[in-house]
Amino acid sequence: MTIEKISRRDFLRTTALATGVVALAACQPAAPVETVAQADQVAAPSANCEPDWNQRLPPVPKKYDPPVEISVIFQDVSYHEGMSATNNPWYNWFKENMGIEFNVHWVAQGDIATQKLQADIAAGTLPDFFAASGSLLAQLIDSGAVEEIRELYENTTTPLVKQQVGYPDGSWWNQAFRGEGLYGCSHSLTKNALTGIGWIRKDLLDELGLEAPDSLDGLENAMRKMLDADLVKTGVTVNKELLTWNHSIDQVFGAYGVMPTTWRDQGGSLAYDSASPGIKDALARLNSWYKSGILNPDFYTMGWEQCRAERDRGDSAWYTVPMWGTPLPTVTTTDGKTLQWARTDVFAGPDGQKARKGTNPLFHAWVFRKGLEPVKIEALLNQLNYYMELEVNGPEKYDNYGPLWGITDMFLEGVDWAWTEDCEVKQAKESLVATGLASTGIMFRDVGFWHSTFPNYQFNTDKYLLKLASQDPATLNKAQKVFLENPTPLAAASAYEYVMTTPELDLLDQYMGIPTERMATLVPELKKMEDELFIGIITGQKDLAEFDNFRDAWFTNGGDQVTEDVNVWYESVK
């Protein structure tokens, strides 16, 4: 299935593969361990230029001869001239070096891909290997449509893979287990990939002689002064969904120790936090902000694109965005205004509490069609082993900077990078950022384990980037220097470091199960009731006292049944 790219970079750290040779099981799990070494491959320099780094690729775990053919789903992307889904550097490398040949099952993405998979399920014509999540994943497992892989997975994947993906104890693996059986490779979303980080107009703080606020009271004071001085049109940019991944006001609720839409342990069982008493206090604060203009009077109509336009015009003074949307310290608007942004810490509430909505690590799982030959499953797991070695150890161990450049890129000369006239490294004109076309990694992103996400992937990549930035430029090679020319990744890395070094501020949704049938029926109406109440109270269309009836009404209208189903799941995974 198609999965959207979350970040420009994304993967992680140490290894148990000090020798550079990967030990793997042969076709049958009980077979003797086989090791296959391959000479490091070095990029050929251009005519008159010599690289000052020794770029290599890791040795392949195993080459399959005869090649194994695996049917997969391809994404509909644009390719460089002369390339295609089955003819590009990444595809060809795996075909030639590992003996894995991916065939096109069909080409689609998004909702169309989901529809096609549903049709395949009904017709019994699934691809050999694909990704699924949520109710679709549960349907595939419970209907017997996908292969049980635990023995193969444990005997074939390397210690490095198991360590980085948190196997088997990470909570994200629950979705792929049924008893002792494992029915998919359930890797996690990057830690806090969607967690909002606060940004405030430093230029306006300086103009008013204010320090960056560290509390809700301080933020409110700064916003009121900016509005009174007619420096902004509104104080806080907020999405109509209130707690979505972009332009969220989750920190307001966190300052009162609560987090709407999440399930949290209260006395050994999960309770829906939207009905907790502290929610009322947060709504009262937001209502006062709405009345005084701190919130846009039309915020409840604004999606993320309208929010982005509001802040980019300089119409507001504070907003949140995940690390991959980090602004530069100085930004020039389309009409020539200069905006200066500074990161804010999570704000403390009246009683000193502070929290943000952390990212639930649950992601999709890669699954294998029922009846797929073990050798093909093993080949795919060996591809995963190779990816993990490259993505974790590429920069430090192999002087290969693809993991910094983009998802699973090999940092290929002429495709990802090229020489300048002065024999310096630059991004190649054919690359993703320069042309909008697919980089080598994006070309291959939906074929096999294109993106073996694990919790610390982004953080450890960022740590390497920040390490380069802290060094004397004279000690860096030409390839390393190119990453420091772009201030955007560095700004994002610094912001993300704050998120990752303050995990105690995260309030996480502790329910990560698959909705039951009655949950699927009841939750949409319960959520609609909640949204109408919250927006109504904030905008003054509903009295704050109506929240007192919300909890009883929520249970009466099906919340009790939803709570029962959630806790049946919780008891099974505690």
Image (cartoon, helix red, strand yellow):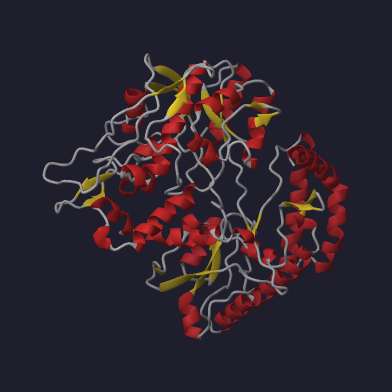
Tell me: 36 left or right of 294. Answer: left
Across and down, in percent, residue 338 comes to 40, 73
Residue 311 seen from this side: yes
Across and down, in percent, residue 483 comes to 32, 54
Nearest the viewer among 224 and 59 is 59
- In the depicted structure, whether residue 40 falls above or below residue 252: above
Residue in the image at 54% along x and 60% along y: 501
Residue in the image at 46% along x and 51% along y: 460
Furthest toward the left, the residue is 48
Tell me: 37 left or right of 511. Answer: left
In which image quadrant can residue 439 be found? top left
In which image quadrant can residue 414 be found? top left
Nearest the viewer among 50 and 528 is 50
Quadrant containing the C terminus is top right
- In the depicted structure, whether residue 510 falls above or below residue 77: below
Tell me: 461 left or right of 357. Answer: left
Residue 447 seen from this side: no
Across and down, in percent, residue 255 comes to 68, 67
Residue in the image at 77% along x and 65% along y: 278
- In the depicted structure, whether residue 456 falls above or below residue 382: below
Across and down, in percent, residue 282 comes to 73, 67
